Amino acid sequence: MYRKNNKSKYMILIIMFTILVIIGLITLIMKDDRKIGRIETFLKDSTFLVGKVVSAPFNFITDKFTEIKEKNDIYDKYQNMKKKYEQTAVYLSKIDELEHIIKELKTLNNIDYTTADYSYLNATVMSRDVGFWYDTITINRGKNNDVKNNMAVITSNGLIGKVVNVTTFTSTVKLLSSNDLNMKISVKIKIDNDYIYGLLTGYDTKSKCYIIEGISYAGEIPVDSVVTTTGMSDVFPSGILVGTVKLVETDNFDLAKIIKVKSEVNYDQLSYVTVLKRDLSD
C-alpha cells in the first residue's frame, strides 16, 4: 500500500515537472530576443523552403490567370475604343451635314441665331472663396475676351453655372451648386423620341444631385434618362448636358414628380472651365 502511494506521488511529480519544462520551452520560444539554436534554425529554414516550393506552382497558376484576365480586359477596352473611333467619322459627317442644313434654313427664314448657337472660350479657375466653396469661382477671362454677364459656363461633364460679374481680365461665375433661388433653369428630359420639361431648383451637395421640379408627366421616367437645357431663356443655350436621372419621387400632394439628377461635375475640383459665348451673327 505504501509503495503504491509512493508511485502515485512520483507520477504526479513527473507530470508536474514535464508540464513546467514544456511551459518553460514555450516561454523561451516566444521571446523575441532569445538566441535561436541550430536545430530550430534548420527546422525553420526547412519549413520555409518546403512551403515556398509547395506554393510556387499555385502562385504561378494564379499569376497566369490574373495576367490572362488583365489582357482580356485590355483587349475589350481596345475593341470598345476602336468601335467608338470608327463611329466618330460618321458622327462628324452627320454634324457637318446638320450644320449646313441649319445654316440654309436660317438663311431662308431670315433667322439671326438659334438657341443652340454658341462658341467656346476656355478659361482657368483662378480662385474661389473657401467659406463659400459651392457658391462662386473666379476665372481668368473678362471683358477683353468679350465675356459678358449671364453667359453659360460648362466643364467636359456638363453645365456648372453662369457669369455674374465681369472685369477687364477676370469674371465671377455663380455655380449651380450654390442653391441660389435666382439660378432656376428650364430643363428637358429625353424619353424615347420625346421630351418632358421641368425646372432645376436646387442642388444637393451630399448626393451631388440636382433637384428637378414642376413635372406633371404621368408616365414612367426611366433612370439614366439624359437631362439637358431647353434654351428657353437668354442665358443657357439649348442642349447643354445637366446630368442623368438618378431617382424619381412625388411631392407631398402626390401630384407632381420630383427628380434627382446625377451630375458628373466634381465641384470640389474645378480647375478648367469653358464659357459659352452666344453667336448673334453667322
Image (cartoon, rainbow, N blue to C red):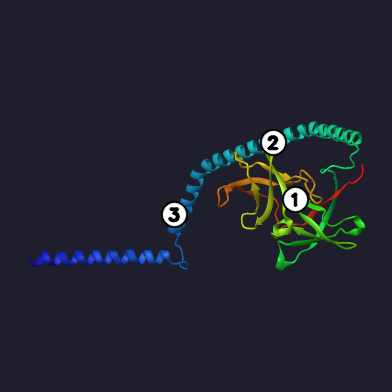
Q: Which amino acid does label 2 sit on?
A: Asp
- Location of residue 150 by image quarter: bottom right
- Point 71% across, 66% down: residue: 132
- Point 30% across, 67% down: residue: 20
Q: Nearer the viewer, residue 242 or 121?
A: 242
Question: Which of the two discs, 1 and 2, sits closer to the camera?
Answer: 2
C-alpha separation, residue under disc 1 versus residue under disc 2 = 22 Å
Q: Which mark is residue 159?
A: 1
- Point 90% across, 46% down: residue: 280
Q: Pick whichever of labels 1 and 2 is earlier in the sequence.
A: 1
Question: Which of the two discs, 3 and 2, sits closer to the camera?
Answer: 2
- Point 77% across, 51% down: residue: 154
- Location of residue 16 by image quarter: bottom left
Q: Nearer the viewer, residue 82 or 282?
A: 282
Residue labelled with disc 2:
194
Q: In this view, does 168 lie to the left or right of 198?
A: right
Is disc 3 placed on a helix, strand or loop? helix
Q: Which of 48 and 4 is in front in this view?
A: 48
Q: How crowded is mark 1: few (under 14 residues within 10 Å), some or many (20 or more)?
A: many
* Residue 102, above or below 244: above
Residue labelled with disc 3:
43
Q: Where is residue 163 in the image (x, y as percent from the top left)?
A: 81, 57
Q: Which amino acid does label 1 sit on?
A: Leu
Q: Nearer the viewer, residue 255 or 172?
A: 255
